[in-house]
Image (cartoon, rainbow, N blue to C red):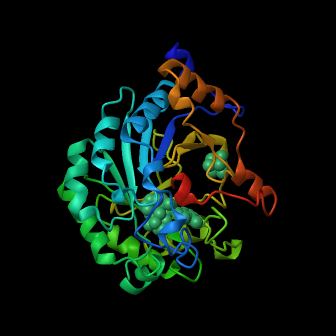
Amino acid sequence: MNTARLAETRDRRGRPLHDLRISVIDRCNFRCPYCMPAEKFGGAGAFLPRREWLKPADIERLARAFSGVGVRKLRLTGGEPLLRAELPEIIERLARIEGIEDLALTTNGALLAAQASALRRAGLRRITVSLDAIDPAVFARMSGGYGDVDSVLAGIEAAVAAGFHSIKINTVVQRGVNEDQVLPLVRHFRNTPHVIRFIEYMDVGNCNGWSREQVVAVAELRTRIDAEFALEPLAPSIGGEVATRFGFRDGAGEIGFIGSVSLPFCGDCNRARISAEGKLFTCLFASQGRDLRDWLQQDDAALAASVAGHWLLRADRYSELRAERESASPQRVEMFRMGG
Ligand code: SAM
Ligand code: SF4
Ligand code: SF4
């Protein structure tokens, strides 16, 4: 199979496949109400049995096939990826794939202090930590009563000590719930190498009771922050980042905004997701995924061709459609299941 030709694979809207998110687990040690509300996901029964998780070797094979089709960036996620005991082995396998320029992880950070060094040694390049509040009571609420802000801050410190110099901090902002945390978080991370990104609350899945009124548009957030700390736009980063970047005029660092609802970026979306049991999703708002287990029975060339053929047919643009109408598709897979 000619991988050079496959590397040019573009979907029906002309978008290449560049970025692959791999979920290594659907379970989590938090119950953030906007993602996995405790009243709906209290017991263990709601999650995949372990035997259904893709094995590290299968994850590696899939990632190699995707790299042959153009993927340059891998991100491990979940659920909470640090709950998967084989995570260092998975990272080691992915770190040696030729053509992969970036290997990153998204975590809630609660278990990071204990694992940061091992992840670094395994070959992880970058870490994003989700942190929705700096105030302990608000943080506890945002994690569904399961999280403790000090353990996440300790995780960030341990990651720095392990050699992850600049960490991305992701904050989902919900109107009336944690919007009062925006400025305290900005103050906390100014004058550090870390980059905080404020994310609009999205209508992922069907369980979080999302409504448009709960979204704080990034334009409003920017105005609020700019009133205390003057901001200036920065050039988009080369890696196709979805965040709009700003610098503090006084040189105290960088922040970002991800306006998934108010500023849909489907036109540039070059991202696919694989769930923990091996389903392929070409949009965060998909109602179903393509089971990859039969593709894993194929030889390497046929596997890469199957991936390319699937991407060629992709036409997803949910967020643009949401902007045009009030609702685009009623049935959606939960984000923690497909990999956030
Ligand atoms: N458990 C890890 C974590 O929280 O970082 C990784 C998986 S989580 C699903 C990935 C990211 O999705 C987190 O930053 C989380 O805040 C974000 N997320 C989950 N539900 C969301 C929603 N409804 N709107 C916007 N972002 C959401
Ligand atoms: Fe868990 Fe992350 Fe979802 Fe929170 S956002 S419930 S930490 S998977
Ligand atoms: Fe990509 Fe789907 Fe999000 Fe649009 S809605 S940016 S196609 S994941």
Residue sitting farthest toward the top = 2
Of residues 173 and 206, the one nearer the viewer is: 206
Q: Give the answer, above or below, for where 281 lies relative to 182.
A: above
Residue sitting farthest toward the right = 325
**Looking at the image, how many numbered discs can be counted on the residues?**
0
Q: Is residue 316 visible from the viewing direction of this image?
A: yes
Residue sitting farthest toward the bottom = 137
Q: Give the answer, above or below, for where 45 lies relative to 145.
A: above
Could you tell me residue 135's position as x and y percent?
A: 38, 83
Q: Quadrant of residue 111?
A: bottom left
Q: Residue at x 35, y 29 (%)?
A: 97
Q: Residue at x 52, y 77 (%)?
A: 38
Could you tell me residue 123's position as x and y percent?
A: 26, 41
Q: Residue at x 52, y 67 (%)?
A: 45
Could you tell me residue 290's position as x and y percent?
A: 63, 40
User: Is 263 displayed left or right of 277 in the figure?
Assistant: right
